[in-house]
Image (cartoon, rainbow, N blue to C red):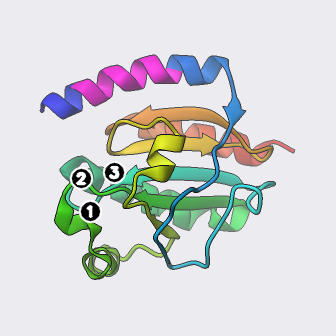
Amino acid sequence: MHNAIRSLAAAVVTFAAASAHAAPAPEFAGIDNWINSAPLSMQQLRGKVVLVDFWTYDCINCQHVLPYVKGWHDKYKDQGLVVVGVHTPEYGFERNLNNLKTAVQRNAITFPVAQDNRYATWTAYNNQFWPAFYLVDKKGDVVYTHFGEGDYAQTEATIRKLLAQR
């Protein structure tokens, strides 16, 4: 509960800040392994809308948002959305690649998952929460952030808006 409240407060502050100023999306850094994909880079994804989803498989809040993330992936992947799940572990057992692969399979995750055991991408994004969404526009700028659960309609509306931009 404490994490949910902290995440909600951070989401309000960060959303306001992110909405006012777009910033270049950091590259995926220090990724130990990629699941469901060859290694990706932000440079390579230029021209696409990218949802960077920081999560960890044992986080209940991450489990609650997963159906939405999977739904957005399924609904918008053919329109130019790329979802990248950046798995940054909270607990030691979550660092194990086989455990992560089992969780990806168990949850029927088909989008790319980057294993960020060293928190390098997490740190590059200055992230502090699970789950955390960063929407990157076609020019490669982070234009929307959300931490924690909720605001699904707003997040999806932002995805649609970004996909419609030229």
Is the magenta region chiefly helix, strand or loop?
Answer: helix
The image's mark for residue 57 is 1
- Amino acid carrying label 1: it is Tyr
| Residue 97, magenta (yes or no) | no
Q: Is residue 14 left or right of residue 51?
A: left
The image's mark for residue 90 is 2
Q: CA distance from mark 3 to mark 1?
A: 11 Å
At 48% from the left and 66% from the top, the residue drawn is 114
| Residue 12, magenta (yes or no) | yes
Q: Is residue 156 visible?
A: no
Query: Magenta stretch?
Result: 6-15
Counting residues from the start of the chain, the first of labels 3 and 1 encountered is 1
At 24% from the left and 47% from the top, the residue drawn is 61
Q: Quadrant of the C terminus?
A: top right
Image quadrant in which you'd find residue 3 = top left
1 or 2: mark nearer the eye: 2
- Amino acid carrying label 2: it is Glu
Please say if the residues under marks 3 and 1 sit with CB atoms less than 8 Å apart.
no
The image's mark for residue 65 is 3
Q: Is residue 42 above or below residue 6?
A: below
- Label 1: few (<14), some or many (≥20) within 10 Å? many
Q: CA distance from mark 1 to mark 2?
A: 9 Å
3 or 2: mark nearer the eye: 2
Q: Nearer the viewer, residue 147 or 117?
A: 117
Q: CA distance from mark 3 to mark 2?
A: 17 Å
Task: In the displayed orientation, state which residue is furthest to the right.
Answer: 166
Image quadrant in which you'd find residue 20 = top right
- Label 2: few (<14), some or many (≥20) within 10 Å? some
